[in-house]
Image (spheres, rainbow, N blue to C red):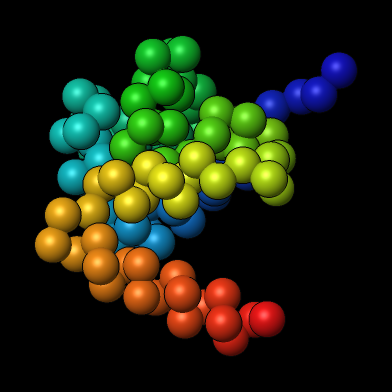
Amino acid sequence: MISINYKEMGQRIRKQREFLNMSREELAQKLGVTPKFCSDIELGIKGMSIQTLHNISIHLNLSTDYILYGKANESDTSNIVRMLESCQPEKIKYAEDLIKTFILAIN
């Protein structure tokens, strides 16, 4: 049986929140919780409801498996798709150019 390490789970949440340049207050507002509760989750002090886990997954573009266990499906491109879907339409061309440049650089 796999156990949940709340501290590691919180670290994964914080890392992604910071990667997205989102403040703790912004995330708390999107989740409908207090910034203190968000802090407690990130520090591994408190757990969360399934609904809060779901909301974190949506707003941070992370799978629940990754949040809970640190396991990412390597062939899963849904995070990339969700990030692109959240872009403003006029910015999609820039994202496309960046991806093309990246692909050309690694091949």
Residue 27 visible from this viewpoint: yes
- Res 70 seen here: no
Apparent side of residue 90 relative to residue 36 in the rendered image (left or right): left
Establish if 95 lies above or below 11: below
Q: Position of residue 77 (x, y in %)?
A: 55, 46
Percent x, y of residue 17: 37, 51
For residue 86, side relative to residue 51 (left or right): left
- Where, quadrant-wise, is the C terminus in this rendering? bottom right
Q: Nearer the viewer, residue 17 or 102?
A: 102
The residue at 76%/24% (across/down) is 3
**Frontmost residue, 11 versus 64:** 64
Residue 29 x/y as whole percent: 17, 34
Q: Residue at x 46, y 13 (%)?
A: 50
Q: Is residue 42 left or right of residue 93?
A: right
| Picture quadrant where residue 60 is located | top left
| Rendered residue at 25%/47% (across/down) | 86
